[in-house]
Image (tube, rainbow, N blue to C red):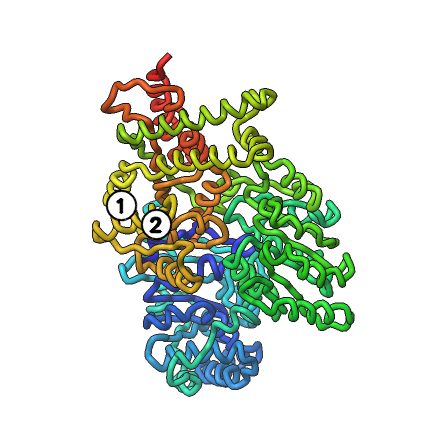
Amino acid sequence: MGLRELQIKQSYDSESDNVLRDFYIPALTESTKYQRIAGFFSSRILAVAARGILPFIKRNGTMELIVGATLTNEDIRAINAGLSKPEELIQSSMIRELSEINEDFIRDHVKALAWMVAKGLLKIKVVIPIAGKGLFEDRESLKGIFHQKVGVLVDENNDMMTFSGSINETATGWLSNIEEFKVFRSWIDSEKPYFDSDLKKMQKFLSGKATNALIVDVPTAVRDNLVRLAPASIDEIDLNKYYASEGHIIAKRKLRYYQKNAIDNWRDNDYHGIAEMATGSGKTLFALRAVDREVPDDALSIIAVPGDILTKQWKSGVQEEFTDPLILVCSSENPDWKDKLTVVVDYLKTGNIELRRIFVITTYHTGSTDKFRNVLARLPVDKLCIVADEVHHVGAPQFSRILNIDCRYRLGLSATPERPWDEEGEEKINAYFGKKIMTYPIDQALADDILSKYTYHVLFVALDPDELQEYRDTSRKISAKVSTILKRYPFLKGVPFPRLLAEISSRDSAAFYSIQNLMLQRTNKLKEARQKLEALKRIIHGSGLKRCLVYCNDMAHLGEVVELFYQEGISTLKYDSSMTEEEKERNMKSFSDGNAEFLVAVKCLDEGVDLPTCDSAILVSSSKSEREFIQRRGRLLRKHPSKKIANIFDILILPVDPSVSNTSITEVDYKIIENEIDRAKVFARSALNGDDVLLEISKMEQDLSSRIET
């Protein structure tokens, strides 16, 4: 990789950006050389300059730090009067600063930079602004001269990037000040003049040729003091602990406008509501901040999720947002959860609690049990909050008993909260959680630059003649069975097919399962058409993919696809329900780290799995369910510094190949493409190349519709 691979904006504002997480850490991770004009020397400047720098240190990156001299007004008058030498006062001030460190956070970060000094990887220069034959008359005047900040980053490819503006390498600069800086890249022609200006300024200071400034190396005694602070090995210092506790304050993410509005709407709706937010747009952060701001500290917050993967992700989110939270996971993974939950409830009932947030994270399966609900029933209603992630699940009969938990604060989350063709389940959800308090669709998230832009590519492949004949035969069997049912229940004629199936299910379960099995056979024949594997070969050999998800139909289909990758000599990993949780996590991490180009998966990867480094997906087999294919797209569009745009490749099945055949088709044959086309149009409308794809789809539709036998 390198700096070119990062998704860097041209300007950052700490009021709306997390400059540390979104710029500073990713940029340093890809750099081998770092030059920085900072503020006035202090141990805290050194400490905050070391934030996020550990990957840079461990790859032996070199750093040059330019700091302003820390002088009092008395020092300035003594120097101007010839009573003291600048170097002596600077040395005395710096040594005193280093000797008075009394915070672990500062001490450990300074030790990290001290290790760089000891290894010859960090050089520090000190700038003393001068006016005429002496220093500026007071510290405030001197301070104004050294206000401009510039940084230069260089990677192993010798690509360079500068940033400049008012950002301060001080604690308050990173923590609370509203700072702004611009970024300029050496390889972008339009940015080159500004890049050159920043680079010239940096070289002027490093070469000692700056006007109105005396530039000296950090005094030897100060260097020796730093070396004495250095550990024998950088591994002796654990800087990561500060990211989750004290240091976490620095990386605190700021809410976006729609998240703030959603919290206000939730409060105004008496703490009931459903937030419909595009996958990847920050549902977790919004919900946890809503709890933090609106739910009393002594209340119990329940987070209900579909499965164990999401329990882990929510636990990580809670730990990131709250200082030392008490978290209890209630699921089959924690069999003694009932005893622990009872202790937590008893603890809350005493009313004598510390200022410590308490969260219970449960799966819908466990949360719907009588023993879970009975323990919670011992708490007052106003001491309970429930956050239901992927809230559409709780409309299902097996999970809806969780809606019997009576609590004051109720918040549902989903990118797709509706339950098509399940009016009863959807009504249960709406009756419990209330109305939508916000809708934030994917098109708005793309426009707001919250999600990665993407391109969409369709590949049309046809059924082989024998596959088409099997499809026709199965369709005739389905039609025959439905006709038989309609003769028995003529009042069902004209009912939309999904609703018709629900009616058949309630009246004749044997007929329903027979029809359902035939439909499944027909669907699988389409999803596993032979020509799809040939199309997959063309994609993987011609698209230069780096981290790509490949979606299959079922376990047998996944095996065929994995075998194809092996035959083609391409590294791949799999992710399926036959694997243990440890195996799944290991493969996901290996894929995210770039150890394999492809991750082949089935439906179990649809919800709750974060793979922000993934930059492409191939839909060898896709779902008819709009919810499922929207979830799959969401997996791909999460932002990451290594990802510029995402790419989706969708293999669509046709009854015949229009380019090589003049064969007529039936109306039943034409239905093959209808669900495929519906999905393709949804994807194309939001894609960067959407207009071209929609035109391509329209031409194909016209061609095939003209072949339908009359």
Q: Is residue 110 visible?
A: yes
Residue 30 x, y percent position in the rendering:
35, 62
Residue 295 x, y percent position in the rendering:
71, 58
- Give the residue type that dot 1 points to: Ile
Q: Earlier in the sequence, mark 2 or mark 1?
A: 1
- Other-residue count near label 2 (Cα within 10 Å), few / some / many at <14 / 14–19 / ≥20: many
Kindly indicate whether the residue at mark 1 contacts the one at mark 2 (C-beta within 8 angstroms).
Answer: yes
Instruction: Find disc 1 in the rendering and name its residue.
Output: 540
Name the residue located 35 percent from the left edge and 64 percent from the top edge. 204
Seen as rendered, the residue at the extreme top is 710
From what the image shows, is residue 268 above or below residue 198?
Answer: above
Name the residue located 44 percent from the left edge and 58 percent from the top edge. 23
Name the residue located 57 percent from the left edge and 76 percent from the top edge. 73
Of 56 and 173, nearer the camera is 56
Quarter of the image with the C terminus is: top left
SS for dot 2 = strand
SS for dot 1 = helix
Residue 168 x, y percent position in the rendering:
51, 64
- Give the residue type that dot 2 points to: Cys
Q: On the image, which quarter does residue 464 sit in?
A: top left
From what the image shows, is residue 444 above or below residue 488?
Answer: below
Instruction: Find disc 2 in the rendering and name its residue.
Output: 548
Residue 90 x, y percent position in the rendering:
47, 81
Of 46 and 638, nearer the camera is 638
